[in-house]
Amino acid sequence: MTLPYIDQLLAQLARGNPQLERSFGRHIHWGYWPDPAAARPDQAEDYGRAAERLSLELLDLAGIAPGMRVLDAGCGFGGTLACLDERVERLDMTGLNIDPRQLQRAARVARPRPGSTLRFVAADACTLPFADASFDRVLAVECIFHFPSRAAFLAEVRRVLRPGGALVISDFVPSPFFAPFGRLPKLRALRRINVLGECDTSCTAAGYRALAARAGLRVTTLRDITRHTLPTYAFLKHLAQQSGGSRLVRGFSAPLIGLLDFYGRSGLLKYSLLRFDRG
Ligand SMILES: C[S@@+](CC[C@H](N)C(=O)[O-])C[C@H]1O[C@@H](n2cnc3c(N)ncnc32)[C@H](O)[C@@H]1O
């Protein structure tokens, strides 16, 4: 799988880009502002705090207690695990990603406190290399739309969760009307300018309930937090204007960001937190 935005981010971080270090150096996801009107879209530090806050919203929903075994699937740079480690003791944590380059950085970002353990595993989230019932909680922050199959991922999560365990994710959930447009066509021409890579944002709330039931899970929370994430787009526009990326990508970024902003504001694509419970 090719994700051009990850390649660009890694290249810019390797060059020591201070803005990106502060905004996306720990988390590769949207920000959460409790009061969106107070956001400062021109400040990388403000974005970094909002990204941390988004992880906290997920962790609150996951209800992780001392002693639990936690898997973060698609863990990126390990920011959510680092955030969790700062709050809860005696954890057995695993970060999994398909891209070993990100795991190298994650090993520097997230270092477990004494009494907790953390390992990183390079693998596909749809074929989890873990025994049955080996986790109390699974997290997947803003990455399920890249996975080859939501159904395969949910089936794997059901298998590796112990009875009574839970999965918490964030995803862009389309309105039923918008769902057919939630998949970017796999056109060769688009591949050159699509910085996001392959994304499937066509799974509606009803689609999630059906997929979960088929996998032996139950959607117990679905919270639309779009309003709190919208300042992300103003910050991304600010970044794109200053970007050192190729002209082609720079040219495409602004319209793409504008489109995502419009989808969010109009309710076509809802940034949502979901919790699935295994009975
Ligand atoms: C938007 S980033 C989110 C990263 C991280 N969860 C965070 O919130 O900072 C999407 C992540 O999904 C990962 N990813 C994509 N396909 C994957 C797969 N099949 N299995 C595991 N990870 C995958 C990418 O490498 C990337 O780290």
Image (spheres, rainbow, N blue to C red):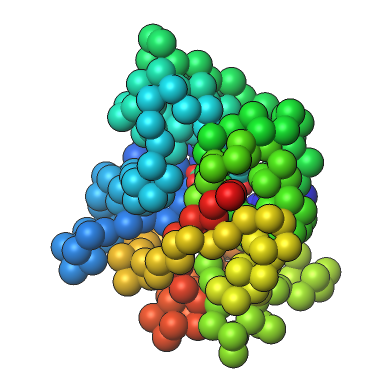
Q: On the rendered structure, is 265 left or right of 71?
A: left
**Residue drawn 31% across the image and 65% down it:** 228
Q: On the rendered structure, is 79 left or right of 39?
A: right
Q: Which of 19 and 276 is in front in this view?
A: 276
Outermost residue to the top: 114
Residue 234 location (% of width, % of height):
34, 67
Q: From where the camera sits, is residue 163 visible?
A: yes
**Residue drawn 22% across the image and 60% down it:** 34
**Residue drawn 47% across the image and 27% down it:** 68
Q: In this view, does 72 lie above or below 182?
A: above
Occupied quadrant, residue 67: top left
Residue 10 location (% of width, % of height):
57, 38
Q: On the rendered structure, is 74 left or right of 137?
A: right
Q: Nearer the viewer, residue 237 or 151?
A: 151
**Residue drawn 39% across the image and 50% down it:** 61
Occupied quadrant, residue 261: bottom left
Q: From where the camera sits, is residue 258 visible?
A: no
Q: Is residue 144 above or below residue 190?
A: above
Q: Which of 207 and 246 is in front in this view?
A: 207
Q: Which of 234 and 153 is in front in this view?
A: 153
Residue 89 location (% of width, % of height):
35, 21
